[in-house]
Image (tube, grey):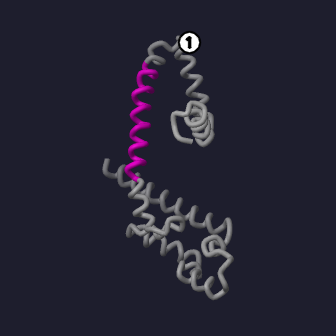
Amino acid sequence: MIGWALRRLTQSLLVVLLMTLVVFVGLNAIGNPMDILVGEDLNQAERLQAIAHLGLDQPLWQQYLIFLKGAVHGNLGQSFVYHEDAMRLILQRLPATFELAFSALFLAVVIGVPLGMFAGMYPEHPLSRLMMAASIVGFSLPAFWVALMMIMLFSITLGWLPA
């Protein structure tokens, strides 16, 4: 059991490492981060100073290693939007994220388990067939599209949520 847990932990760490590498390289592949972060309205001296301050004058592999070292120590850097510590911003928003996640899980269990039991007990019932069709359609649709449709339904059409 301990061997399985260690294998899974190692696999998880490798996946996280690989995904950070893919995102890091991908963000640099779509464009020059110097143009995005520093902007083009600065003069050359200010631009070079900002590039050096952000560490963008280092090779890509060195930037990645600096990021990993900071991430291991809990330093995810500064938010470019809010100009605050990124880890502090994440921790501030974590309670609301957990509230939303646990509310969704609670609703899924309270609604899904009884409906699933009904569908299992009466598989030929028309309501069971409707639930099966709805679940197949629900899993087939992209999550972002379903989210947009839910926003339109509950915010715009029904007016239950702020739009």
- The residue under the point 44% across, 31% down is 108
Query: What is the three-letter code of the residue carrying label 1?
Result: Pro
Residue at 58% in and 25% down: 134
The residue that mark 1 highlights is 126
**Which residues, given as a range, are shown in magenta?**
94-117
- Can you give x and y, in whole percent of width and height, for residue 2 in the image? 31, 51
Give the image quarter of residue 111: top left
Residue 95 painted magenta: yes
Q: Residue at x 61, y 75 (%)?
A: 38
Most foreground residue, 79 or 21? 79
| Residue 50 coordinates in the image, percent (x, y) | 57, 81
Give the crowd class for mark 1: few <14, some 14-19, many >=20 residues within 10 Å: few
Magenta stretch: dominant SS? helix
Q: Is residue 98 left or right of residue 123?
A: left
* Residue at the extreme bottom of the image, as rendered: 45
Q: Position of residue 16 (x, y in %)?
A: 48, 59
| Left or right relative to 82: residue 157 | right
Query: Which of 26/1 is in front?
Result: 26
Instruction: Pick whichever, 46 or 111, lies toward us.
Output: 46
Q: Is residue 111 magenta?
A: yes
Determine the secondary structure under disc 1.
Answer: helix
